[in-house]
Image: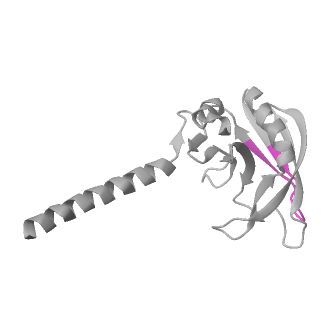
Amino acid sequence: MGKLLCEMMKKALFYTAALLLCTSSALADTRIPGSKVSYNSKGVYVDERYDTIGKTYLAILCKNGAPEISIFSKNALASEQASPHIDVQWTRDSEYLGTSDGTVRRDRQSGQLSVWTMDRSYTAALFLEMHSAKSSLSATVFRGGLSPVTFTFPTKGIHTALQAVDYCR
């Protein structure tokens, strides 16, 4: 009886370890070599060119078969007194693309107003423009109650990452 129990415990431990390994690797980011782009099963992430600690990035999250575009910033994107609805002006390789509306919310980790999510009505147009960017996509965030800030997101590797997530279909 003791041997049988020991064997059952070994198998249970093996299956638990295998399950944990599979779960953690499913959410691990895969970095596109030579780029600031990574992806996982939830979407594509582009680190901001000048952020050396990786806390500012563009996220293309795949939700319900469509992309949702957000900017996560290490700095506040709105003051406490400002409206959560702010505009972002986009450029592709220094060419003006347009302005989109979005909403600022609190980051779950830092608690500050540092996550901007694009209004869905603009997402498809920007998603298409990303494909034709040769070097970068820039976003000037008109931060509510604060001075504007411009983020630059290098696009090298973005096509490969979007293919890996099947373009969020």
**Which colour assignment does the render follow?**
one colour
Q: Residue furthest front?
A: 1
Left-right relation of 117 to 142: left
In this orientation, does residue 76 appear? no
In the rendered view of the protein, which quadrant contains the C terminus?
A: top right
Compared with residue 65, is residue 135 higher up or lower down, i.e. above or below? above
Look at the image and give the residue range highlighted in magenta: 139-152
How many marks are shown on the rendered structure? 0
In this orientation, does residue 78 appear? yes
Q: Which of the pair 36/107 is nearer the observer?
A: 107
Residue under the image location 76 percent in, 26 percent down: 132
Compared with residue 45, is residue 86 higher up or lower down, i.e. above or below? below
Q: Residue 109, image x and y in percent? A: 63, 67
Q: Which of the pair 81/10 is nearer the observer?
A: 10
Question: Is residue 23 inside the magenta stretch?
Answer: no
Q: Residue 52, image x and y in percent? A: 61, 50
Residue under the image location 69 percent in, 59 percent down: 74
In the rendered view of the protein, which quadrant contains the N terminus?
A: bottom left
The answer to which quarter of the image holds residue 107 is: bottom right
Q: Residue 3, image x and y in percent? A: 8, 65
Residue under the image location 20 percent in, 65 percent down: 9
The answer to which quarter of the image holds residue 10 is: bottom left
The answer to which quarter of the image holds residue 135 is: top right
Q: Which of the pair 152/162 is nearer the observer?
A: 162
Left-right relation of 119 to 108: right
Residue under the image location 77 percent in, 64 percent down: 105
Q: Residue 148, image x and y in percent? A: 87, 54
